[in-house]
Image (tube, helix red, strand yellow):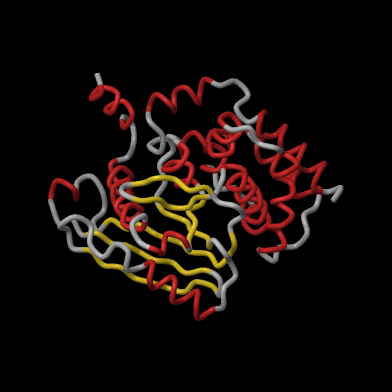
């Protein structure tokens, strides 16, 4: 029965994530009906979730620009326009704030006040959804239908490259990975035909666009070493609980050598990138 399938699809998902998804979907449906949809591109885990069927839920939305690297005044104006896309979620009191975090990064926060005892028992009220907007260009995004219109989203190959670059930088700075990305890497590698040569080319371009230090052999080796650490894998499973449906979580834990496919492709990328 359809209702049973829907129930199983949500089984094990944290209630706050389900509500956040409704808020984010309302935002994306509103964006899909206005011209601003042509200027911003959804990236990251929620691009995989809303656009490509990933079962992983995420707390926020990440956007880059279709053209990219606009001047600071134009970027600020675009972010404030984006903050007005969803000024109220259903009939609940809603507040929207905009903050400049860096020259090329703004954060929009949508806070929804449910003010109901039954919801306060499920999650912290108000519930906040973050939208991060980066003044960085997306490379040949896809167009997907949503609601009564469409939005632009990054292709899986670009999401994959983005996550590699972001996690290398995170590992350099903090000595850790964003563990949700392991699931996203695996989802992309097992569901899409990814050309590793093209991924390598995107990685090289993105390192330059993000003004990062040149990639070294040690950057890739550190990623692989991190994946080889059993404690990190145990933490990964702990982190994923509540972010993917119960059935998917059980399937994931049953996969022998879950990270092997990821490591194989990291080795290929290392060999290609370092020769360029």
Kindly give the residue lying farthest to the bottom in the view shown.
Answer: 73
- The residue located at (56%, 78%) in the rendering is 71
Q: Position of residue 264 (x, y in %)?
A: 72, 32
- From what the image shows, is residue 53 above or below residue 138? above
Q: Is residue 89 left or right of residue 152?
A: left
Q: Is residue 168 left or right of residue 105?
A: right
- From what the image shows, is residue 63 above or below residue 77? above
The picture quadrant where one finds residue 33 is bottom left
Q: Position of residue 124 (x, y in %)?
A: 26, 53
Q: Is residue 240 left or right of residue 137?
A: left
Q: Position of residue 46 (x, y in %)?
A: 45, 47
Q: Nearer the viewer, residue 74 or 167?
A: 74
Kindly give the residue lying farthest to the right in the view shown.
Answer: 275
Kindly give the residue lying farthest to the left in the view shown.
Answer: 117
Instruction: Give the total of numbered labels.
Output: 0
**Where is the N terminus found, in terms of image quarters?**
top left
- The residue located at (70%, 51%) in the rendering is 203
- The residue located at (61%, 51%) in the rendering is 162
The picture quadrant where one finds residue 172 is bottom right
- The residue located at (15%, 57%) in the rendering is 91
- From what the image shows, is residue 182 above or below residue 135? above
Q: Is residue 193 left or right of residue 251?
A: right
Q: Position of residue 101 (x, y in %)?
A: 49, 71
- From what the image shows, is residue 207 above or below residue 272? below
């Amino acid at each position: 029965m359809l209702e049973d399938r829907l129930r199983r699809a949500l089984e094990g998902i944290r209630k706050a994530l389900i509500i956040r998804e409704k808020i984010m979907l309302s935002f994306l449906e509103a964006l899909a009906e206005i011209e601003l949809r042509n200027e911003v591109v959804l990236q990251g885990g929620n691009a995989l979730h809303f656009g490509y069927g990933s079962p992983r839920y995420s707390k926020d939305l990440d956007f880059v620009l279709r053209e990219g690297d606009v001047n600071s005044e134009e970027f600020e104006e675009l972010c404030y326009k984006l903050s007005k896309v969803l000024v109220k979620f259903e009939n609940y009191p809603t507040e929207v704030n905009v903050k400049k975090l860096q020259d090329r990064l703004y954060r929009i926060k949508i806070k929804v006040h449910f003010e109901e005892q039954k919801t306060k028992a499920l999650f912290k009220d108000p519930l906040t959804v973050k939208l991060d907007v980066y003044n960085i260009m997306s490379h040949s995004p896809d167009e997907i239908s949503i609601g009564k219109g469409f939005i632009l989203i990054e292709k899986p190959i670009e999401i994959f490259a983005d996550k590699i670059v972001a996690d290398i930088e995170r590992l350099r700075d903090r000595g850790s990975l964003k563990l949700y990305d392991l699931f996203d890497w695996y989802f992309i590698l097992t569901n899409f035909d990814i050309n590793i040569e093209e991924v390598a080319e995107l990685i090289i371009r993105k390192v330059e666009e993000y003004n990062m230090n040149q990639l070294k052999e040690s950057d890739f080796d550190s990623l692989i070493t991190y994946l080889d650490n059993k404690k990190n894998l145990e933490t990964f499973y702990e982190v994923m609980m509540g972010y993917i449906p119960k059935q998917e979580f059980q399937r994931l834990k049953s996969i022998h050598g879950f990270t092997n496919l990821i490591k194989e492709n990291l080795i290929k990328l290392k060999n290609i990138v370092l020769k360029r």
